């Protein structure tokens, strides 16, 4: 097909897609490409400009049309997460960028490499792992990753006990994560112990893996904001390889309450009027008391504990109704038989 024919074909399809010509006319024109005259001065100019680019023929350009549904569902799942607006925006920007690169590729236009390694900075329970998991699924859906699974590790999974052991251990983890997301929690701890520590061997191996598997894997390093900033400062080579750095701020009181409501809804429970009121107070107290506040993990612990207390309360009843099964009462939030027991804590480690 000549350039002129190809251009004319694209032009007709575009006119039809924009609703400017009906389907019958589009078909008619497509079968008689040679008779179509591109008259409009704007289109003539585009024709001249594109010609100077010396573009290659195009084959499978409609391929991207179907993928939609699943991606839409994943984006909805991401949007139901409370807050996290900055991350959501960045993810959407990258989706657009990758999609455009893919489309350009299908038109045999030049593409820019997309490196998706990221740093997540924030306190525990601010949604880092949750977001990383969704990112894996989304980037699988748009064809950037093959598998999209998330593998979460920390220092002990990567660092070994003798020279050479760490590189071997780290490589194994990387290989397991290929095609998906490798999420390294508390990554700053890899710099612990300085030059002599095996953490350095791990970082070197990761850097090499990032070169070797540029587009086969997303590595996400996560940890407390200050510790991660310090870690990156002491590893300038590493910092420059992570173009995407995202802050996960602590949640506000309102956000924490919304997160609690979502968690109950997912589990098919409802807070009754009094407990709805009361959960504000509890979360506000936790927020003021804890050093690490604005934390969704605290909310999850509170929700799960109240569900256990709810069961303990209603099992003693003679006739348990559907309503009893669904509604959480103030005393379920309070703890043991309505006494004001110690609040659920922030960090999993301390809770165990
Ligand atoms: N924005 C949010 N909306 C709803 N639930 C959230 C949100 N952020 C975190 N959670 C929930 O809080 C818990 C802890 O989140 P997680 O992603 O493990 O935090 P992190 O990895 O930062 O420690 C998970 O159960 C998660 O589902
Ligand atoms: Mg986590």
Image (spheres, grey):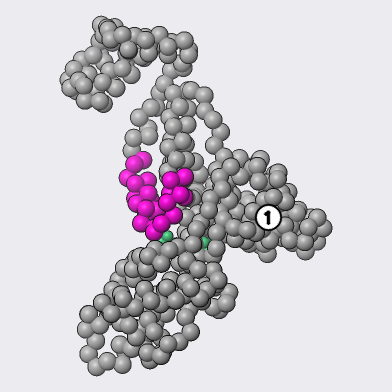
Q: Position of residue 74 (x, y in %)?
A: 38, 50
Residue 48 in view, yes or no: yes
Count of all numbered marks drawn on residues in the image: 1
Q: Residue at image x 38%, y 91%?
A: 337
Which residues lie in the magenta part?
A: 67-91
Q: Position of residue 26 (x, y in %)?
A: 22, 19
| The one of 294 and 214 positioned closer to us in this rendering | 294
Q: Quadrant of residue 122?
A: bottom right
Is 113 rendered above or below residue 108?
below
Q: Residue at image x 63%, y 56%?
A: 228
Q: Position of residue 301 (x, y in %)?
A: 45, 75
In the image, taking residue 147 as reference, residue 163 lies left or right, namely: right
Q: Position of residue 139 (x, y in %)?
A: 47, 45
Classified by dominant secondary structure, the portion drawn in magenta counts as helix
In the image, taking residue 103 as reference, residue 274 lies left or right, namely: left
Residue 311 in view, yes or no: no
In the image, taking residue 210 as reference, residue 67 lies left or right, namely: left
Q: Is residue 158 magenta?
A: no
Q: Quadrant of residue 106?
A: top left
Q: Which residue, as the protein is rendered here, is positioned at the far front?
A: 288
Q: Residue at image x 42%, y 11%?
A: 49
Quarter placement of the C terminus: bottom right
The crowding category of the residue bearing disc 1, from other C-alpha atoms within 10 Å (few below 14, some 14 to 19, many at least 20), is few
Is 245 rendered above or below residue 351?
above
- The residue identified by callout 1 is 230
Is the CB of mark 1 within 8 Å of ligand 1? no
Is 289 rendered above or below residue 231?
below
Secondary structure beneath label 1: helix
Is 177 rendered above or below residue 125?
above
In the image, taking residue 141 as reference, residue 169 lies left or right, namely: right
Q: Residue at image x 34%, y 41%?
A: 68
Quarter placement of the N terminus: top left
């Amino acid at each position: 097909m000549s350039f002129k024919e190809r251009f004319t074909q694209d032009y007709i399809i575009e006119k039809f897609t924009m609703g400017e010509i009906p389907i019958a006319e589009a078909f008619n024109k497509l079968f008689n490409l040679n008779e179509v005259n591109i008259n409009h001065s704007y289109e003539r100019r585009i024709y001249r400009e594109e010609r100077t680019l010396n573009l290659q023929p195009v084959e499978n350009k409609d391929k991207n049309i179907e993928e939609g549904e699943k991606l839409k569902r994943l984006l909805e799942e991401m949007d139901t997460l409370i807050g996290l607006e900055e991350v959501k925006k960045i993810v959407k920007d990258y989706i657009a960028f990758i999609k455009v690169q893919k489309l350009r590729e299908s038109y045999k236009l030049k593409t820019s490499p997309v490196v998706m390694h990221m740093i997540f900075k924030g306190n525990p329970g601010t949604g880092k792992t949750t977001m990383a998991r969704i990112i894996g699924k989304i980037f699988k859906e748009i064809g950037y990753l093959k598998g999209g699974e998330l593998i979460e590790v920390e220092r002990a999974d990567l660092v070994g006990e003798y020279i050479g052991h760490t590189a071997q251990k780290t490589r194994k983890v990387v290989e397991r994560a290929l095609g998906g997301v490798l999420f390294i929690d508390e990554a700053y701890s890899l710099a612990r112990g300085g030059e002599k520590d095996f953490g350095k061997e791990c970082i070197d191996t990761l850097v090499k893996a990032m070169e070797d598997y540029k587009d086969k894997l997303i590595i996400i390093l996560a940890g407390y904001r200050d510790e991660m900033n310090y870690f990156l400062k002491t590893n300038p080579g590493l910092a420059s390889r992570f173009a995407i750095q995202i802050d996960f701020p602590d949640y506000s009181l309102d956000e924490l309450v919304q997160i609690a409501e979502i968690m109950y809804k997912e589990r098919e429970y409802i807070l009754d009027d009094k407990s709805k009121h009361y959960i504000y107070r509890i979360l506000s107290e936790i927020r003021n008391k804890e050093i690490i506040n604005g934390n969704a993990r605290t909310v999850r612990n509170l929700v799960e504990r109240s569900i256990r207390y709810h069961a303990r309360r209603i099992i003693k009843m003679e006739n348990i109704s559907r309503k009893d099964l669904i509604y959480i009462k103030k005393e379920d939030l309070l703890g043991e038989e309505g006494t004001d027991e110690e609040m659920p804590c922030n960090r999993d480690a301390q809770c165990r």
